[in-house]
Amino acid sequence: MRFIFAIIYVQSNLKFTLMKGGNLKLSIDRKWLKNRREKMGFTQEKLAKQVGVTRQHIGMLENGDANPSPYLAKKIASALGFDWTKFYEEQ
């Protein structure tokens, strides 16, 4: 019998997950980005098209599994009406 498990530890905006095989995954909690996108009336697809990336990339940014380049951060921030440096701030 095999057991698959994950341990999640959340501190501030960092999320650590112990994955199968003992690998540790670090991601950044960006619920604020999803909330802002939805508040501004964008779907992931619509925002992705506007800033020139895939819908999957927007999802990865929202889940903290990817970090935007400064160029992309500026494009997203402009589309959603916030300061692009928010991507790099500690919560």
Image (cartoon, rainbow, N blue to C red):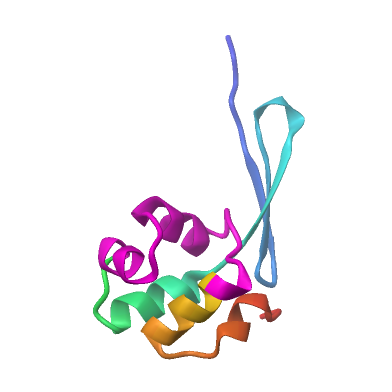
Q: Position of residue 1 (x, y in %)?
A: 58, 9
Give the residue displayed 65% in from the left and 70% down from the top. 13
The mark tally for this picture is 0
Q: Main secondary structure of the magenta part?
A: helix
Residue at 35%, 64% in the rendered image: 48
- Residue 11, given in percent of the width and then of the height, sits at 71, 66
Q: Position of residue 12 (x, y in %)?
A: 69, 72
Q: For the view shown, which residue lies furthest in the top direction?
A: 1
Pinpoint residue 36: horizontal percent, then vertical percent: 39, 81
Instruction: Locate residue 34: give its quadrant.
Output: bottom left
Relative side of 69 to 58, left or right:
right
In the rendered image, residue 14 lying in the magenta stretch gets the answer: no
Q: Is residue 70 above or below residue 18?
A: below
Give the residue at x 61% y 32%: 5
Work out whether residue 34 or residue 78 is closer to the camera in this orientation and state it: 78
Given residues 75 and 65, the one toward you in this image is 75
Indicate yes or no whether the magenta region holds residue 55.
Answer: yes
Please provide the residue range marked out in magenta.
Answer: 44-71
User: Which image quarter holds the C terminus?
Assistant: bottom right
Q: Between 59 and 29, which is closer to the camera in this rendering?
A: 59
Q: Residue at x 63, y 84 (%)?
A: 85
- From this view, report whether residue 69 is shown above or below residue 56: below
Q: Picture quarter containing residue 70?
A: bottom right
